[in-house]
Amino acid sequence: MKYKGMVSSFQRISCRFASTYRHMFEIVNPATGKSIAEMQEDYGEDVIRKFEFLAAGQKKWNLTPVSQRKVLSEENMLQTSRLTEKVTYEPLGVVANISAWNYPYFVSANVFVAALLTGNTVLYKPSEYASLTGQEITDLLHEAGIPEDAFMLTTGGGGVGAKVASLKGLGGVFFTGSNKTGLEIAKKAAPNLVKVQLELGGKDPAYVRYDVPDVVAAASTIADGAFYNCGQSCCAVERVYVDKRIYPSFVEAFVKNVKSFKVGDPLAADTYIGPVARQPQLTVLASQLLDALEKGARAEVGGSLHDNKAHKTGYYFPPTVLTDVNHTMSVMREETFGPLIGIQAVEGDAEALELMKDTEYGLTASVFCKASSIAEEILKELDIGTGYWNCCDRVSPRLPWSGRKGSGLGSTLGMDGLRAFVQPKGIFLQQPHGA
């Protein structure tokens, strides 16, 4: 209850933009299912006023010097005695950052840091399930010296996000979240012909080849990649394919790892798996589990919705490992986003590749084997944004992070991610005749 009545710089600033009557929404702790705070939900006119405030501040913010402009440097394409052709790079303007709840600092910063560095201002809409974190991010940025008219928070549910995406005059809409919501965001932004970038979900596969040097190590790595953050990661491993020659030993090691994961209060130091963040996700997980069991899957760990007897409150789902799975089951085809995974035996590379391709998503994939050349051959055949050899579920600021097919549009991180926040302008400079 320590958050009740908490006043922040964001709340004080928001009073200047809020309607007279303010609707409040609850913040719920998923470990207990109890409300811990209330926050203001912005109305459409609040969103418009905040956007106009940022639009007015953008030109001033763009003039703020940056010691080294990597992606804003002019590029000379042609230089003759009379003609210069060059490209200049300019900010998009006001950028909408509609962010996710599962890694609220990380996925938000992937957008707003690059946006601010390249001279844009940011209208930041965190998920309603991470609004307290969004408030804290805003407070910290303002305390660090980012002007109020360069970064503003707007809070609320899906209706507020839709209003943000449909604002006329935006320079770009950058969304992180589910495929379904991403498509709705794109529809809202489409009439304004605004740049839209979508970082969406995945159904990320891992393939363990027969020649993997250490089966136990591979099982440990993949188990962590599947269950870290309670499986609530867009790049979490969501389906595993293992060569039948090592399948029994892999499953044994994988199950041993998962059984060692401590389920409990996320604030406890020894907890590895906490609750899922959203109560509706429990229904999704239960549906995938029951569908798989009805079609012949076997639960090596979990398998009962009542396994967590010690957790009578909160949104807990027991860590579950399924074998004897196949692609008729939703657990192998639809995004899971929770502590539930299926492991399927395969004949070899050809079958594994066929199954890895059998998805509407294209975010990441990993191959565990002896030679990098084999892994790269397999990864080359997959329509994905990121590939891994003997690792998984990793992100680097040096590399672009992107999705294909149902996993999104555009890139964050790396040089490509910085380029996403600027727009090129071609300039022709010709000396006048007689000069």
Image (cartoon, grey):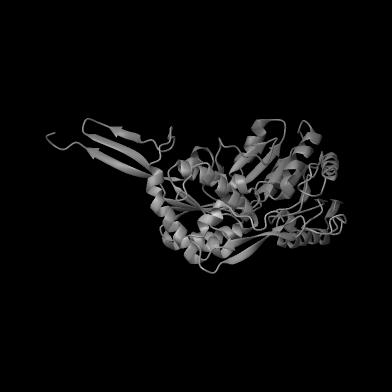
| Image quarter hosting the N terminus | bottom right
174 lies left or right of 69? right
Image position of 369 with respect to 53: above or below = above
| Image quarter hosting the C terminus | top left
Image position of 199 with respect to 70: above or below = below
What percent of the width, then of the height, locates residue 252? Answer: 86, 41
Query: For residue 389, what is the image quadrant?
Result: top right
Front residue (pair 373, 230): 230
Q: Is residue 348 visible?
A: no
Front residue (pair 212, 429): 429
What percent of the width, then of the height, locates residue 339? Answer: 76, 51
Front residue (pair 177, 37): 37
Query: For residue 158, what is the image quadrant?
Result: bottom right
Taking the spot 47% from the left edge, 65% from the top edge, the residue there is 45
What percent of the width, then of the height, locates residue 204? Answer: 67, 47
409 lies left or right of 132? left
Taking the spot 64% from the left edge, 58% from the top edge, the residue there is 5
Q: Residue furthest left?
A: 434
Image position of 288 with respect to 397: above or below = below
Front residue (pair 237, 20): 20
Number of marks in picture: 0
Q: Is residue 176 visible?
A: yes
401 lies left or right of 258? left
Taking the spot 83% from the left edge, 45% from the top edge, the residue there is 262
